[in-house]
Image: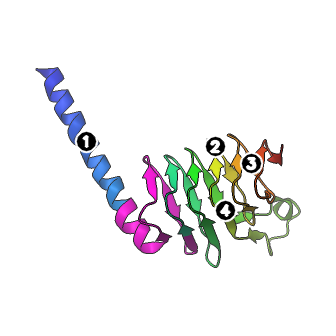
Amino acid sequence: MKRIIYKIISKIFFWIERVAFSYRYDYVYREKYNIDNTFRFNGKNILMYGNGQINIGANSYIGSHSSILAYEGCQVNIGKNCSISHYFTVYTMNRNSQDIVHGNQENRMVTGNVSIGDNCWIGHNVFIREGVSIGPNCVIGGHSVVTKDIPSNSIAVGSPARVV
């Protein structure tokens, strides 16, 4: 009897969690940002935030536990037919650690737009820094840190990511 009650309660909580994520993805994010109707939120705990612009093309998807920060005045553009795996992170604003170490509190924020071209595949646990542009038809290997632009039709891996 306890097992049956436990299964019923767990299914109820699972359903409530799905409804909450679906509401956030379908109503909050799609209304605030320019996200194509065919874009798929492929998992839970996907976070999109900031007062900048997020533009996502058709037939793309993003995996669970991913986050996109669009700082005010900046853009994140993701093209069509992009496959983005789990634990993906992109920021359009960062702090310059050298200025903090040397005591310079002025101009320590670094901002920049991030662009990912059409037909890109981005692996698991990839971090993309501000101001980076990834050309169309690129593959970014898992656990990579993209700090510089990646040209079209390239495969990049590593930390920092380098074209191979």
Q: Could you tell me which residue is drawn at 46 percent across and 59 percent down?
A: 39
The span picked out in magenta is 25-54
- Asked if disc 3 and disc 4 are in contact, CB closer than 8 Å, the reply is no
Q: Is residue 51 above or below residue 6?
A: below
Mark 2 packing: few (<14 Cα in 10 Å), some, or many (20+)? Answer: many
Q: Earlier in the sequence, mark 3 or mark 1?
A: 1
Q: Where does label 2 land, which residue? A: 123
Q: Where does label 4 land, which residue? A: 117
Q: CA distance from mark 1 to mark 2?
A: 30 Å
Q: Position of residue 4 (x, y in %)?
A: 14, 25
Q: Earlier in the sequence, mark 3 or mark 4?
A: 4
Q: Is residue 143 above or below residue 51?
A: above
Q: Earlier in the sequence, mark 1 or mark 2?
A: 1
Is residue 144 part of the magenta span, yes or no?
no
Mark 3 packing: few (<14 Cα in 10 Å), some, or many (20+)? Answer: many
- Asked if disc 3 and disc 1 are in contact, CB closer than 8 Å, the reply is no
Q: CA distance from mark 4 to mark 2?
A: 15 Å
Q: Position of residue 46 (x, y in %)?
A: 48, 53
Q: Amino acid at mark 2?
A: Gly
Element class at badge 1: helix
Q: Is residue 68 left or right of residue 153?
A: left
Q: CA distance from mark 4 to mark 1?
A: 38 Å
Quarter of the figure that contains the C terminus: top right
Q: Could you tell me which residue is drawn at 57 percent across and 45 percent down?
A: 87
Mark 4 packing: few (<14 Cα in 10 Å), some, or many (20+)? Answer: many
Q: Amino acid at mark 4?
A: Gly
Q: Where does label 3 land, which residue? A: 145
The label shown at residue 13 is: 1
